[in-house]
Image (cartoon, coloured by chain):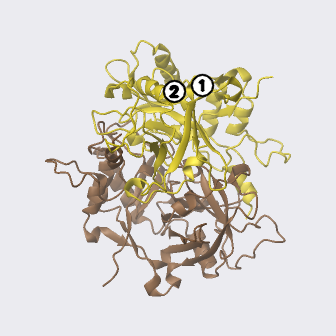
Chain colours: A brown, B yellow
Amino acid sequence: MKQIAFAAALLALPFTVLAQEAKPEKPVTPNDIVAAAKAEEWVAIAPEDLLIMDLSPDAKGRPRRVIIQLMPPPFSQGWVGNIRKLAAAHWWDGTAIVRVQDNYVVQWGDPNGEDTKKAKKLPGDLVVVPESDYVTNENYAGSEKLLNTHIYHRERVRKSILLKSGKRGDDYAEDTYFYRGWPLGWENTHQNGDAWPLHCYGMVGVGRDVSPNTGTGAELYTVIGHAPRQLDRNIALVGRVISGIENLTVLPRGTEALGFYKTAEERVPITSVRLASELPAAEQPQYEYLSTESESFARYVDKRANRKDDFYIRPAGGVDICNVPVPIRQKAAAK
Amino acid sequence: MKQIAFAAALLALPFTVLAQEAKPEKPVTPNDIVAAAKAEEWVAIAPEDLLIMDLSPDAKGRPRRVIIQLMPPPFSQGWVGNIRKLAAAHWWDGTAIVRVQDNYVVQWGDPNGEDTKKAKKLPGDLVVVPESDYVTNENYAGSEKLLNTHIYHRERVRKSILLKSGKRGDDYAEDTYFYRGWPLGWENTHQNGDAWPLHCYGMVGVGRDVSPNTGTGAELYTVIGHAPRQLDRNIALVGRVISGIENLTVLPRGTEALGFYKTAEERVPITSVRLASELPAAEQPQYEYLSTESESFARYVDKRANRKDDFYIRPAGGVDICNVPVPIRQKAAAK
C-alpha cells in the first residue's frame, strides 16, 4: 500500500510530503493557507492566559507537559478567575489525573475531593458562578464585537462561502461561528442572541455537581473523543489544550465506572500547575493563534469545507465547526 | 468536588451510580432505554462478520485483542470480500500498527508496503473495487429496504422526534440515518438517492493511494478522534471496532509526519488476525447490536437528543449522528 500518499492526504501539518513533487497546478490545502498567512494575522497569546500543567515523568523518565489556553472575556470569566487563583495558590500541585474515559474525557483534580474529611482545602476567595454564565447574551456590555462578528459570519454563510446547501447546519445550535479564536454556538433570543463556547476536541471544562452547582474550576476535564456537544450550555468551558494533549490521550483508560481509576497507583500525579506569567520571562512559552477574524482564516475554513487536495475526489461542501481547529503555533524566539 | 455526581452525568454505562438513591421521578436516560430493550430487539452478529485482531502483549504482559465488525451488504462488499480473503490467508500475521495520529487515526498493515522489493505478497484473488462503490444508490437491486428505511426516517424527522428546528442538520450530507446498525449519509440524486457509511469514532476504513486507486483492504485504519467526515465518500469504510479500541487509542503517538512511527521498534506487532468463523465454535466471541429499526432504538436516539437526566439543565434538542453509538454488547453464553 502507498502509505505515504494516503498519509499526505490525511494531513495535519504545514507541509505535505508531496510538496517536493513538481505538479503544474498543485491544489491548495488548508495548511498551505495557514503557512502563507501574514505575520500580522497571528495574535499572541498572553502569558496570563496560559496554564502550564506538568505531570510526573512517564515510565521512560520523559517529562510530560500540557499547556492550556484560557478563554478570554466575555466567556466563563468567573471560573477562569477562580482558575487563576488556584494556579497562583499552587493548589493543583500534588493532585492527579483521576479519570480517563475512552472517546470522552480526561479529568483531573483532588482524588479525595469526595471525602469531606480528606478533601484538599480550596482558596477562600473563589467565587460562585451562576448557571446563567454558561451563555453570554449579545446585549452584554462587552459584546458589541461579539454581535458584529456573528452578523459578519451570517453574511458569509448567506454568500455560501461555507455551505452549499441551505439545509445544512449544526445539530446543537441555530448557528455556529468563531470569535477571537474560539468556536461558538449561537441561538436567537428576544434580546439579539446568546452565544456560548463549544465542546470540541481538546476543550477544557469545569467538573461540577448537579444543578445548581456550577463547579469552582478546581476539577477540570478535557475532551479526548468525538465532540460531546450535548454538554454545551450545561457546563462551563474555560479553555483548550494547545500543546501536549498526547500526554493525556495515551493514558490507560480507567477500569471503574466512567473511566475513573480504581487505585491510587493508577492515578497520574500532577507535579505542578502554573500560569505562564508566574514563570521567569525566559521560561514563558510563547504561542500565537491565527486570528479568526482574518482573511486567511476565512480562506482556511472554506478550504477545510471544500478539500481539493490530491487525495480528495469529492469535496464535502460543508464542515463541522469542531473539524476546524484554530491554527496555533509556537512563536519564533525573540531576537 | 463531587466527582461521582459529575461522573454519573457523563454516563456511558447501563446504570448510573445514582441509581441507588430513591428519587420519586427519576428521569429516563438513553442507557435505561437500552437496558430495558426486549431480547427480540437485539440482532446477533454472525461470526463471519467479526474480525479478531491480536496485538503482541503490552509491557505488563497483558493480552491486547481488538474486535472489528465488518459492514453488511449493500456497502463496501468488494473491500469486505478482500478482507475476508486476507484474514483467511492469515496475511496480517506479523504485520504491525504503523501509525497513530492524535485526534485522527490508528493505521495498520505491512510496514514495508512502500518498498516494492520488501513488500509482503498479497493474495492473488483480491478484487479491484471502483470508486463508485464508495456510495450505494437506492436503485441498487438489494436496496429496497434501504430506501424504505430512509423514508421512514424522514417521516420521523418531519414529526420533529429528533430535531426541534428545521434549520438543523448535518454539515456533510443532506440527511443522515441508520440502516441495519450503521450510520449513513444520504443525498438526493436523479435516481432516488445515494447512501454511504460515515466516518464516526471507531469506524474502520481502507488506506489507499491517490485516485483512482481505492485500496485493497490490506491496509486499514480506525478513527480515534472527532469524526473526520470530510473523508466520507472519498475512501471505503468497511466496519467498526466493537471491542478493545482502548488497545489502540492508548498507543504512543508517532513522531514522524502524520503520526507514522519512525523506527521498527516503535511499531506494535500484530500477532494474528482471524475471522471469528475460523475459530472453534467455543472460542468464537458472541456479540449483538440493538436493531436500529427497533422501537427501543428510536427512543434511545430521541433521548440522546433530549437529555433530561439529573445532570442536564438544557437538553440540546438535536444530536450529531456520530454521537449516537449503536448499542453493542456481548451475548450471554448459550446454556
Q: CA distance from mark 1 to mark 2?
A: 8 Å
N-terminal label among 1 and 2: 2
Residue closest to the eye, B29 or B59: B59
Which residue type does callout 2 highlight?
Ala
Seen at 68% across and 54% down, the residue is A254
When the figure is inspected, residue A66 is found, relative to residue A259, above or below; the finding is below
- Where disc 1 sits, the SS reads helix
Image side of residue B252 versus residue A24, left or right: right
Total numbered labels: 2
Residue designated by label 2: B88
Query: Residue A59 at what x, y percent from top left?
Result: 61, 66
The chain containing the residue under callout 1 comes to: B
Which residue type does callout 1 highlight?
Glu
Image side of residue A15 versus residue B267, left or right: left
Quadrant containing the N terminus of chain A is: top left
Whether residue B28 can be seen here? yes
Residue designated by label 1: B278
Q: Are marks 1 and 2 in contact (CB under 8 Å)?
A: yes
Query: Residue A108 at what x, y percent from top left?
Result: 65, 64
- Where disc 2 sits, the SS reads helix
Residue closest to the eye, B49 or A199: B49
Seen at 37% across and 59% down, the residue is A149
Tag shown at residue B31? none
Question: Is disc 2 on the same chain as disc 1?
Answer: yes
